[in-house]
Structures are given as C-alpha cells and as structure tokens.
Image (tube, rainbow, N blue to C red):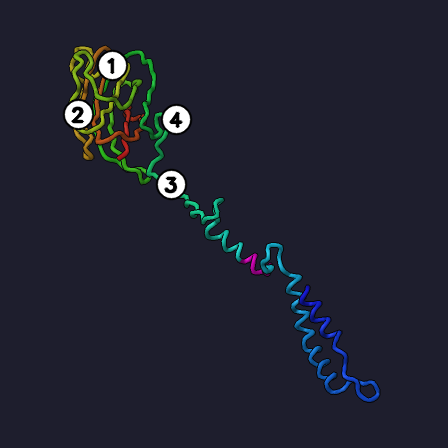
Amino acid sequence: MGTTVGLGAMFAGAPPEQGGGGSAGPRGWGRLARASLLAPALAALLVACSGSGSDGGAAASPSHSTASTTSASATTPAASDGTAAPPAPTALGTPTATASVGPRVGARSWSSQPATATRQPTRPVQLVSLRSATNVENGVRFQRLVLEFAGGVPGYRAQFVPQVIRPGSGAPLPLSGQAAFELVLTSAAAHDDQGASTLRTAPNGTGQSGLSYALAGDFEGTVHIGVGLSRVAGFRVVELTGPDRLAVDFLL
C-alpha cells in the first residue's frame, strides 16, 4: 500500500502547467496523459496485493485446485507422513472349484471329513461285490468304489485314517498311494452261514486312476475295507437301489 500512496501523491502533487486563461499547457497535458495510462497498472497492482493468501502465496484458481485434488485421489493418495502411499491392493478373484469341498453337511456332500450312517437290520446284509471305475458328473471327475449287497444297505463309517488296521490281528493293511481311507460296514458280513465267502468279485483291486482297495476284515457282523489314494481328497457316500449298493466317490 506504500507504493500506492507514493504514486497517488506523485500524480496529485504535480501542478499542471498554467497557460493562458488558466488552462493546462502542453507539458501539463502530457503529464495528465501519462497519469491516465498509469492508472490501469495501479488498479492491477491493488488487485494483486488484495488477492494474496495469508501464507504469502498467490491464491490458487478454484477450478485448477479441484482438478489437481481429483487427480491425486484417483492415483496415489498421500500418506500421513506426507509421502505418496502405495496403491491399495486389488482383490484377487476366488478360483471356482469343480466341486464344493467343505464341512460335512450330509453323506452326499463333498468333504474330507468322516461320514456315518446307523442302521439296525434284523440280520446282517451280505456284501456280494466290490468294483471301481472313473466317473464324470456335471463336469466333476471322480473315482467311484461300488459295494453291492444282498438284503439291504448296511450302516457305515467312512473316514481317512493314518493307516488301515486288520481287525483281530492288528496288522496294517498294505495299500498303494499316499492316503489311507477306511470304510467300516456295520450289521454286514462277507460270508454266509456256512462261512463261505459271498463275494462274486475279487476281494481287492486297483482302479484306473490309481485307487486301490482291499477287504481288511470280516468279523462279528462288521466288514472292514481299506482304500489307498494318491492324496486326501473330498469324498461322498451315495446310496443306490436296484440292486442295493453303496457308492463311495473320491474327487480326482
């Protein structure tokens, strides 16, 4: 503002040249012309001084400030210490599995947890066949072990175990693969009243995908079957009729 006052005083204190009749002379008119030319510059200086911010910096244009803020928030937000914060991690999509494997909610659900069913038939049902095959259902590939019975379907307990033990002797059952699976049939037998085997197939075998199975024991109304697999996998137990069967499916 001191500059403004000085300029005004300069203009106001310079008397015009007096000519005839009290009018301004040529030199006076020249000074007035120069003053009129300097007036816009003085007005611009006053506006610039009044628009200065409190921190001494020039006031930013609102439109420019908005664009800069939006751009910063959309790219790299500032951290609390003033440095640029790293971009937020992008959420990765969850791969879609061929079959949902989770907690056991039923014998027919895919899970690696045990599955059981309890039955009390009037007499033990007879195991007559053991076989395996690779199946595909709704795009899901699995190895199926089929147990066929005469006289109904028994109760069962199916689970992965450290190893399958032969009942009575306590000896481990040799099986191929890295994972051992045990199926215990209750109220069931693999022999008739005379003690002869009721099986029409071999008591052991190997499936196309490396699954192996074997009869581990047939003692006092309980039949033990061991299964060897390449890994612990989701499985399910499906009951079928016509003829009576239990199908144990293992995900490949």
Residue labelled with disc 4: 105
Q: Residue furthest bottom?
A: 20
Q: Residues within 10 Å of mark 3 (few under 14, many from 20)?
A: few
- Pick the front one: 216 or 155: 216
Q: Is residue 40 magenta?
A: no
**Separation of marks 3 and 2 at Cα, in angstroms:** 35 Å
**Separation of marks 4 and 2 at Cα, in angstroms:** 29 Å
**Separation of marks 1 and 3 at Cα, in angstroms:** 43 Å
Label 3 or label 2, whichever comes before in sequence order: 3
Foreground label between 3 and 2: 3
Foreground label between 3 and 4: 3
Residue labelled with disc 3: 94
Q: Of the residues shown, which amino acid type is indicated by label 3?
A: Thr
User: Which corner quadrant of the image does residue 117 belong to?
Assistant: top left
Checking the image for residue 176, the label placed there is none
Instruction: State the extent of the magenta-drawn residues as a range.
Output: 60-67
Mark 2 touches mark 1? (CB < 8 Å): no
Look at 49% across and 52% down and name the residue there: 74
Secondary structure under the numbered disc 4 in the rendered image: loop
Checking the image for residue 222, the label placed there is 1
Please state if 179 lies on the left or on the right of 43 as rendered: left
